Amino acid sequence: MQFNIFAKVAPLLKEKKFDMDFEALETFLGRYHVGQFIYPSAMQRELKLNIQDVYKILEEAVKVGVLEQYLEIYCPKCQRFVGVRYKTIYDIPDEVSCMHCDTEIEYPLQHAIVIYRVL
C-alpha cells in the first residue's frame, strides 16, 4: 500500500504545479506502511519543504483516501509527544498528563498537531 500513497497523490501534485523533488517524495512516502503515522515535521526536514506545502501535500493524500488525520499532543514543558493520539478534537480530554515528565497539560487542544495515518 505504501507505493499507492505516491501513485495516487503525485498526479494531483503535478497538476497543482508543486515545485518539489518528486523522486525524493516517492522515497519518503515509500517508507510508510498501513497503520503507521507520518509526522509533517519529519517530512519537512527530509524534503526541505516549507511546512505549509507539507500540509498541502498530505491533505491531497487525505482527499484521495490514502491518509487520514489524527491529532497528537506535545508537552509544552519537555517538548515531547505525550503518547496518545486522537481522531477528533472532541476526543481530546480537558487535561492530559505527559508520560515523559508527568506534567499536567491543562489545555491540550492548544498543544495539538495534525499527523497522518496511512490507510
Image (tube, rainbow, N blue to C red):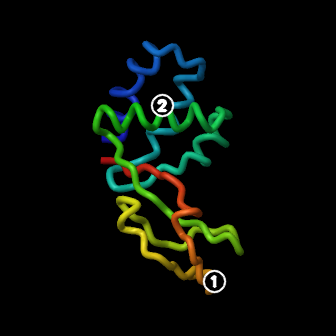
* Apparent side of residue 64 relative to residue 80 in the rendered image (left or right): left
Q: Earlier in the sequence, mark 1 or mark 2?
A: 2
| Residue sitting at x 40%, y 31% | 60
Q: Nearer the viewer, residue 70 or 8?
A: 70
Nearer to me, 70 or 43: 70
Q: Are discs 1 and 2 less than 8 Å apart at CB? A: no
Q: Which quadrant would residue 36 be assigned to in this image?
A: bottom left
Give the SS element for disc 1: loop
Depth order, front residue of 89/114: 89
Circle 2 sits in a helix, a strand or a loop, which is it? Answer: helix
The residue carrying pointer 2 sits among few (fewer than 14), some (14 to 19) or many (20 or more) residues within 10 Å by Cα, namely some
Q: Which residue is mark 1?
A: 103
Q: Is residue 13 left or right of residue 49?
A: left
Query: Callout 1: 10 Å neighbours few (<14), some, many (20+)?
Result: some
- In the foreground, 50 or 47: 50
Marks 1/2: CA distance?
38 Å
* Residue 79 versus residue 16 in the image, above or below: below
In x, y percent, where is residue 1? Answer: 30, 41
Indicate the position of residue 43 as horizontal and vertical percent values: 58, 42
- 96 relative to 62, above or below: below
Residue pictured at 50% horizontal, 72% vertical:
83
Residue lying at 56% horizontally and 36% vertically, measured from the top left: 54
The answer to which quarter of the image holds residue 89 is bottom left
For the residue marked with disc 2, what is the amino acid? Glu
Q: Which residue is mark 2?
A: 26
Please identify, in this view, whether the residue under mark 1 or under mark 2 is nearer the observer: 1
Judged from this view, the residue extending furthest toward the right is: 77
Q: Amino acid at mark 1?
A: Thr
